[in-house]
Image: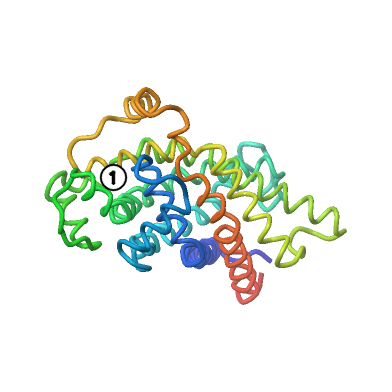
Amino acid sequence: MAPHPVIQAIIDFSAGAIGGTACVLSGQPFDTAKVKMQTFPSMYRGFIHCFISTFRQVGLLGLYKGTTPALLANISENAVLFLSYGLCQDVVRLLAGMDKGTKLSDLQKASAGSLASIFSSMVLCPTELVKCRLQAMHEMEMSGKVPRGQRSTVWTVVKTVLRTNGPLGFYEGLTSTIMREIPGYFCFFGAYEVCRSAFAQHMGTDKDNIGILPLMFSGGFGGACFWLAVYPIDCVKSRIQVHSLAGRQEGFMKTFMGIIRTEGFTALYSGLTPTMIRTFPANGALFLAYEFSRKFMMEAAGA
């Protein structure tokens, strides 16, 4: 028997939050390297150089800069994403003329995930802006874009945004975020569900019983497809959110064309290596934590 809709929403929200926490804790140093390479590609020869340089200049903690807003970003994003994902599946059923509770195809689940990402973008953008600015603060100081020696904490970044741009300043890069999320999460959920279906068919079981390693691989595969599909958009988003700290930043199209004109098309893929290294453990942990915590709560609710 399905639980009450309110209980179901709480379960989806909580499981998403648990998954988001697991995702951050397993991949934060790689995310830091990604943002640094996206926003200042000329400073680093590659991922290893970025990693070693950061460690030498600011220590191990430098690789965990932005962990607090990253946790807030991922917990809030995934909580809202998976809550909306459940609700958007009902919307897809309604549009397809299907009965409530009917199993959706992998394509229909991908469509529900894409629709759900619009809602998660609204809570993700402000926290991701703070995270990206903290992660690239050292490079902003080294390049002379902001004065050196400033104390950079979550609170100082928040105060700076409020003082210079007001509450709407937290939504710098919102257009880029939504443009990334809609196609990205179609690929993310689609690849995840297709991969799980393939494992289930090969193992002769259903998708809920494929085991830990196939589940984690499916999550990682979904994450890899997400980033390969939308990485240039994410690069533009990071530039807008970080460089706007030094003054007004151009919008998505002008920033996009400016990167291609001055740095070449390959600059849009700066930081892809740490992103792809991170995606399997981080997204594997995300879906493992989500699926198992959701299953536990559903059983506790008598579903």
User: Residue 203, relative to residue 122: is it above or below?
Assistant: below
Specify the amino acid type for callout 1: Val
Q: Quadrant of the C terminus?
A: bottom right
Q: Quadrant of the N terminus?
A: bottom right
The mark total stands at 1
User: Residue 212, relative to residue 118: is it above or below?
Assistant: below
Residue drawn at x 43%, y 52% as measured from the top left: 49
Give the quarter of the image for residue 242.
Answer: top left
Residue drawn at x 37%, y 22% as measured from the top left: 261
Residue drawn at x 59%, y 70% as measured from the top left: 293
Left or right, 289 with reference to 242: right
Give the quarter of the image for residue 54.
Answer: bottom left
Query: Where residue 81 sits in the image (x, y, percent)?
Result: 49, 53
User: Residue 171, relative to residue 83: is it above or below?
Assistant: above
Out of 89 and 216, give the one closest to the viewer. 216
Give the crowd class for mark 1: few <14, some 14-19, many >=20 residues within 10 Å: many
